[in-house]
């Protein structure tokens, strides 16, 4: 028997566990409803308004669905994987002729991959229905906005995965994840005030490494978003790419730690 | 069996999405209407409406006149249009007063053929209706031009339409998704029932 079949077996088991009827259907409904209901075309009256409108649209379109997406991932990773670790189901999965990292990949593909596929599928379709003109004209802006938003989400997921593996308890990991989510939502405001108070852009730049939406927001919304006429940080397009890439490197590093821990130090 | 389950669940997801879309498209659009009543001198044009429109904010016009007139939907802001016509009239007619002359409009149309979103010529007593829902964010200026030498009376109504989503496109997608969803769900539902 090749390795593909056991991998698919675990993937199917995980799918069954993560998306019992009608969980997937409820989330798909919420994604679609949130996407269309929240879409907004309001743009600030700035020079780069056309490109900013694409950024603004994607932001409004993905606001609520991203939160729904996060809940789904939290449920799948913390509750799903946590429960497997807590109840010893993971030992059964280890009996399959697969390496441990392959088992984790199958679980994560189900937990994150399917939810991501559904999220992006609905979002892109909605963009084509609502504003085909914008998505065609400003495809780069659309792509970068999604990449930045998802990077924050993957960062949170990576941390949550680490919590779940360390604690081996889903409930505790979920609580830790929720606290982290709210902390990450509030920190940008504090950091921004601190940056303006000190006149230094360094705190903003540090935060942008894990949250590239900050750099994208400043790049696309420009003057309309700035507090003062004398701006402390006006990022260039190169900086946008730089911070976006670094955020994904951070995400990749967190997942790498999780994989190494799962492979060598799980203690099961 | 696994394939039936997989396709069945795909079908239920498509049905859930189509249900959300149906809900969205059932929400009636909110409208704001304003009457139009103008007298357009022979050989002149008038700007009757301008605004910024999006795929969620459209514009419709219903109009009639007692003479032959042209109706234009231009993709420029009234500010840009004003600036261009003013400059052209100053440079070529030596007087900005003549900027409402139909020659100026024709020159603008010649210089910006891509800015014409829609146009039509209608004659006395003819009712014209046009609905415009853009696919991106656009500035729209609505212009009525009277090419004849007689004074023409134009009246009608302009309506702004605010929708949650473009109804036609959403309904089409709802129908497609629901149809595919039902086709995929049926075998799964039958096998579940047998179980």
Image (cartoon, coloured by chain):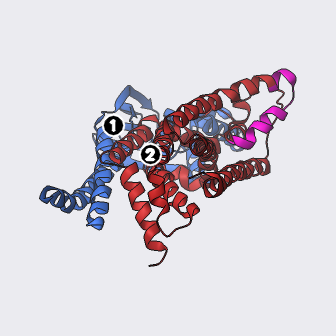
Give the number of the disc on residue B62: 1
**Considering only vertical position in the picture, is B128 above or below B194?**
above
Q: Residues within 10 Å of mark 1 (few under 14, many from 20)?
A: some
Q: Name which residue lies at 36% across and 54% down.
A: A16
Does residue A217 appear left or right of residue A238 in this picture? left
Among the chains pictured, the one given blue colouring is: B
Considering depth in this image, is A241 or A219 the residue closer to the camera? Answer: A241
Q: Quickly name the residue at label 2.
A: A87
Q: Pinpoint residue A85: horizontal percent, then vertical percent.
A: 50, 47
Q: Pinpoint residue B60: horizontal percent, then vertical percent.
A: 38, 38
**Considering only vertical position in the picture, is A82 above or below A44?**
below
Q: Which residues are magenta?
A: A195-212
Q: Name which residue lies at 56% across and 39% down.
A: A59
**Disc 2 element:** helix
Q: Residue placed farthest to the left in the image?
A: B194
**Considering only vertical position in the picture, is B58 above or below A136?**
above
Does residue A174 appear left or right of residue B66 in this picture? right
Residue A4 in sight from this viewpoint: yes
Q: Pinpoint residue B87: horizontal percent, then vertical percent.
A: 70, 39
């Amino acid at each position: 028997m090749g390795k593909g079949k056991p991998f698919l077996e675990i993937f199917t088991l995980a799918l069954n566990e993560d998306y019992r009827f009608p969980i997937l259907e409820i989330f798909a409904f919420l994604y679609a409803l949130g996407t269309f209901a929240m879409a907004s075309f309001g743009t600030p009256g700035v020079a780069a308004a056309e490109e900013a409108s694409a950024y603004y649209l994607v932001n409004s379109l993905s606001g609520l669905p991203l939160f729904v997406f996060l809940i789904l991932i939290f449920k799948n990773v913390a509750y799903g994987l946590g429960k497997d670790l807590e109840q010893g189901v993971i030992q059964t999965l280890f009996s399959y002729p697969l390496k441990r990292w392959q088992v984790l990949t199958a679980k994560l593909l189900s937990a994150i991959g399917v939810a991501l596929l559904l999220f992006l599928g609905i979002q892109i379709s909605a963009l084509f229905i609502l504003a085909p003109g914008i998505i065609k004209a400003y495809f780069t802006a659309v792509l970068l906005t999604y990449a930045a938003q998802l990077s924050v989400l993957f960062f949170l997921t990576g941390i949550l995965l680490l919590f779940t593996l360390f604690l081996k308890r889903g409930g505790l990991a979920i609580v830790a994840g929720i606290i982290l989510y709210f902390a990450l939502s509030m920190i940008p405001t504090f950091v921004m005030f601190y940056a303006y108070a000190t006149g230094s852009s360094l705190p903003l730049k540090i935060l942008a490494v894990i949250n590239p939406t900050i750099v994208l927001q400043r790049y696309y919304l420009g003057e309309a978003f700035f507090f003062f006429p004398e701006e402390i940080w006006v990022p260039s397009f190169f900086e946008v790419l730089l911070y976006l890439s670094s955020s994904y490197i951070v995400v990749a590093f967190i997942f790498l730690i999780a994989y190494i821990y799962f492979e060598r130090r799980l203690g099961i | 069996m696994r394939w039936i389950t997989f396709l069945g669940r795909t079908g239920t997801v498509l049905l859930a999405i189509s249900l959300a879309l149906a809900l969205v498209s059932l929400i009636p659009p909110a409208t704001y209407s304003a009457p139009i009543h103008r007298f357009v001198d022979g050989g002149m044009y008038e700007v009757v409406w301008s605004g910024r429109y999006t795929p969620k904010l459209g514009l419709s016009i219903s109009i009639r006149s007692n003479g032959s007139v042209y109706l234009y939907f231009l993709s420029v802001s009234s500010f840009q249009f004003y600036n261009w016509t003013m400059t052209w009239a100053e440079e070529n007619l030596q007087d900005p007063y003549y900027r409402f002359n139909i020659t100026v409009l024709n020159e603008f149309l010649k210089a910006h053929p891509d800015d014409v979103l829609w146009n039509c010529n209608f004659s006395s007593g003819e009712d014209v209706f046009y609905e415009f829902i853009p696919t991106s964010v656009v500035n729209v200026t609505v212009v009525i031009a009277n090419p004849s030498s007689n004074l023409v009376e134009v009246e009608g109504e302009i309506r702004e339409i605010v929708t949650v989503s473009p109804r036609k496109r959403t309904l089409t997608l709802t129908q497609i998704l629901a149809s595919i969803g039902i086709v995929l769900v049926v075998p799964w539902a039958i096998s579940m029932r047998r179980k």
